Image: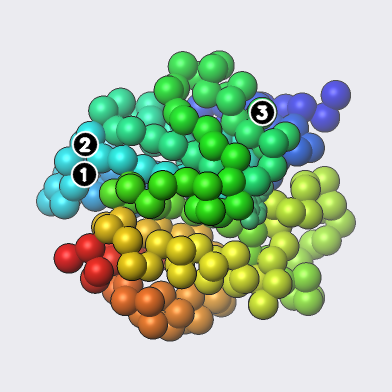
Amino acid sequence: MNDKLVDFYGRDFLVTPDVLIPRPETEMIVDAVLNLVGKPYLPGVKPGEAKLPQNLSILDVGTGSGCIAITLKLELPEAHVSASDFSEKALAVARKNAARLGAKVDFIRSDLMNDVSHDFDVVVANLPYVDEKWDWIDKEALAKEPEEALYADDGGLALIKRLISQVAGHSIKCLILESDPSQHDLVKEYAEREKFSLVETRGFIQVYSNNYAG
Ligand SMILES: C[S@@+](CC[C@H](N)C(=O)[O-])C[C@H]1O[C@@H](n2cnc3c(N)ncnc32)[C@H](O)[C@@H]1O
């Protein structure tokens, strides 16, 4: 009834009240991964220097509709793509999208990376980062989306910080996180404490390399 199709990176994704509506700012996560393997992400843009092979392994944490993971698999067919969410209902929507769009993605139910191996080259995440206290958010507009896809404690950073700590000390080479630009300095400070270096910021996205992975 409330199901609809929403464009993400040029493809239509099924969106139900159980998942976040994919946002255009999140598409930059896909651009950042394509850049890592040296692929141009826009027509006319020169390919970057490949830092990782195209058959890299990627985990999308908090996959929701599956938009990031499925897009990455379709843009990088050689990549091994997994996606996790703690919401069974969200995973059901993501699985439907993968089947509709013909993308082979492994979906796993997990609280962040608790039940997932740490054996990935790249971890990407658009986790909930909205602080309920922010007075500039349109709570009425957001009421159509699941609360657990939007809000987080600790100024909106509780889940992002927990994920950074989970990834720290493992061989994951790159961590790509979305947060509100007003949170970027705090995320960077926290990530640096866990031995990550900020490589670049694009819109809402921050790309970190893992000093531990060498
Ligand atoms: C902001 S939505 C993003 C959805 C999708 N990745 C996108 O960009 O459109 C965050 C997702 O994280 C999931 N999530 C929230 N807390 C989680 C947790 N502790 N572990 C795993 N997933 C979680 C929610 O169910 C939701 O699907």
Task: Check disc 2 and report the residue beneath it.
Answer: 54
- Check the picture and name the quadrant holding the N terminus: top right
**Separation of residues labelled 2 and 3 (CA atoms):** 28 Å
Q: Label for residue 92?
A: 3
Q: Residues within 10 Å of mark 1 (few under 14, many from 20)?
A: some
Q: Earlier in the sequence, mark 1 or mark 3?
A: 1
Q: Residue at x 54, y 37 (%)?
A: 108
Callout 3: helix, strand or loop? helix
Whether disc 1's CB lies below 8 Å from ligand 1 is answered no
Lower sequence index among marks 2 and 3: 2
Mark 1 belongs to which amino acid? Val
- Dividing the image into 4 quarters, which one contains the C terminus? bottom left
> What type is the residue that disc 2 sits on?
Gln
Residue 140 image point, x, y percent: 86, 56
| Gap between marks 1 and 3 measured at Cα | 30 Å
Residue ID for mark 1: 37
The vertical placement of 192 against 95, above or below, is: below
Residue 54 vs residue 206: left or right?
Answer: left
Measuring from the top left, give residue 104's x and y in whole percent: 43, 23
**Where residue 143 sits in the image (x, y, percent)?**
84, 52
- Amino acid type assigned to the residue bearing label 3 in the image: Ala
Residue at 29% x, 49% y: name it. Answer: 121
Instruction: Indicate whether 22 appears above or below 55.
Output: below
Q: Are marks 1 and 2 in contact (CB under 8 Å)?
A: yes
Q: Is residue 46 visible?
A: no
Say which mark, if any, is on residue 24. none
